[in-house]
Amino acid sequence: DWLYRASCSLAYPQHVRVCAICLGSMRTGHGQALFTAECSHKFHFHCITSNVRHGNHICPICRADWKELPFQGPQLADATHGRARVSPVNWPQDDGHMAVIRRLSNSYSGNLLEQFPVFRTPEADIFNDDEQIDIQSETVEESNAVTGSVEIKTYAEVQAIQQSVTQKVFSILIHLKAPKSLESVSSRAPLDLVTVLDVSGSMKGAKLALLKKAMGFVIQTLGPNDRLSVIVFSSAARRLFPLRQMNVNGRMQAMQAVNSLVDGGGTNISDGLKKGAKVIEHRRLKNPVCSIILLSDGQDTYSVPTFDDGVQTNHSMLVPPSILPGTGNHVQIHTFGFGADHDSAAMHAIAETSSGTFSFIDAEGSIQNGFAQCIGGLLSVVVKEMRLGVECVDEGVVLTSIKSGGYASEVAVDGRNGSVDIGDLYADEERGFLITLHVPAAQGQQTVLIKPSCTYQDAVTTESIQVHGSEVSVERPAYSVDCKMSPEVEREWHRVQAMEDMSAARAAADGGDFSQAVSILEGRTRILESQAAQSSDSQCLALITELREMQERVESRRRYDESGRAFMLAGLSSHSWQRATARGDSTELNTQIHTYQTPSMVDMLHRSQTLVPAVVEMLNRSPTVAPSRGSGRSVRSTKSFSERLA
């Protein structure tokens, strides 16, 4: 909390007094009640009553324990002293009944929520109270609505095959690229975002403070046409507020709700996702783009059965059936495993089941960067419901396989056509799919192999679009030819095989064979190193860096349980969907593990990482610096960033 308020205070001149909860101006005579606490800090009355209503009984700034709590409700006699509660000064006459609880006894301060029913707000069964939105076709200017079209490129394994040769496995890379990013907020597709956040007891202290800071960044980043709803869960889940537009008023109210969160209780991920799914299902109106972000630092002990006989737990059951692929309300869940104790297997399974991504936040301070990268993508969706089609052309050419990673694909029984369901694409996002063909011997000088095409919906205009790629053919000379493999096809084969080796190493580590896991990763690293020595390819170098880090994290049971499993699953999620995920230092702008990041993601990461440089500098100059003995130089305390923050 302190770090977030300190960062925000830097953005305002010191002579402008702002509320530490909503960051709004506090000036008398502006129609808002002000409350001055016994520690002398001042807040908007409606902000601090919301804070107290969510269980906070200490000053958000100095952390002083209050004996007098602000209270919004009917005027009642003081329960312990028989006096009327004192009203705050200068509130507007139409602001409802307000009061202050005076000199609370221990019984009241211990469990305020239970003593006063006014603090408990029953939740509706139907979440159809989403805020009204403008119809997108009316808000997007026609001149800004044109996003271009998806680009299709193809690369054949070789350019020529001898006429008499039958090629049983012939590879073609189909490369797709989405249109470029749109500059204007009004010209992009607006977003409905539901965040499902863990506020269990293990989120105490720095973790919860950093989560609030990250959510503050999300709230400030969303535009007025975007809507946000926040679900929090511990032993049970509750909705903080319905889908609400992130205009000035919506942002202020969202900041109030998030900053008043307190930790406590167990971890019921299932209940959190159920309420998040209800928000999606029950919407009266829908923005073109919709997603759920789930963050947890623990393991669900309420809904997932545990087995002692080696039976694997089916974590996909945590995803509500109503939002699964194939339903009318399908939505991707992008999951974030926070810290060393989260259930990475469950979080990865939730993401995979919903076609979302899994990110591993192992450094507490990286949570905002992880959110920023994800939001950078969601706020740049230009393609929806994309489907790639492949049709064989000349007689005898047969499609034998499609290397599609996590994307659903199918090949016709006769092998004459196939397809891949891709879904959404962010601006400038790229996808590569390797297909293999059976190519028969030929009579002529050329064999036409395939013709690719794709259909999708423009996310901004909702227009249905079909794009046809050029036919792919090979020359068929009568004499023997020696052609070098296409570097694009070779690079994609290395990526696919590296992903398969990551999966095999993970299976070995899950079975307790860590030496085998290391051996698998080492073997692939050596192959890629020989390739990189020839080409200096950036993708190859990034894979090598990632594989080496995986090796270090699977050397022992302790390392694997602490971070290896989560790091590998986040890597597999990234390569499976060809979409950026957070793991290790992958969200740092100068890292080599930055595969699949789009310009919009990089821009959002830059905003996140340069938001509060003065605060970081202030932390570095904090009183934890003390003179060393005998040297005359300063020695920084060994306290961690999180310890100082807490």
Image (cartoon, grey):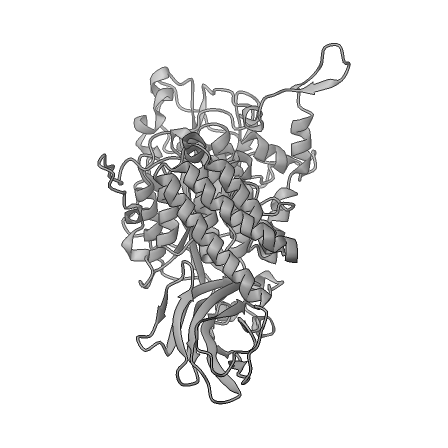
Q: Position of residue 424 (x, y in %)?
A: 46, 63
Q: Position of residue 132 (x, y in %)?
A: 43, 59
Residue 108 lies left or right of residue 162; in this view the side is left
Q: 453 or 41, which lies in front? A: 453
Q: Residue at x 34, y 39 (%)?
A: 511
Labels in figure, total: 0
Closest to the observer, 473 or 45: 473
Q: Residue at x 62, y 45 (%)?
A: 591
Q: With respect to residue 77, does 250 lie above or below?
A: below
Direction front: furthest residue = 479
What residue is at 47 percent from the left and 56 percent from the top? 497
- Image quadrant assignment for residue 168: bottom left
Which residue lies most toward the bottom here?
Answer: 444
Residue 633 visible in the snapshot: yes
Q: Would you say residue 95 is visible in this rendering?
A: no
Which residue is nearer to you in this view: 204 or 80? Answer: 204
Dividing the picture into quadrants, the one containing residue 331 is bottom left
Give the residue at the far top of this rendering.
630
Relative image position of residue 378 (x, y in whole percent): 50, 56
Left or right of 539: which side holds 330? left
Which sits in the foreground, 157 or 375? 157
| Image coordinates for residue 325, horizontal then vertical, percent | 34, 60
Q: 549 above or below 189?
A: above
The extreme right residue here reads 632
Question: Residue 400 falls in which quadrant of the image?
Answer: bottom left
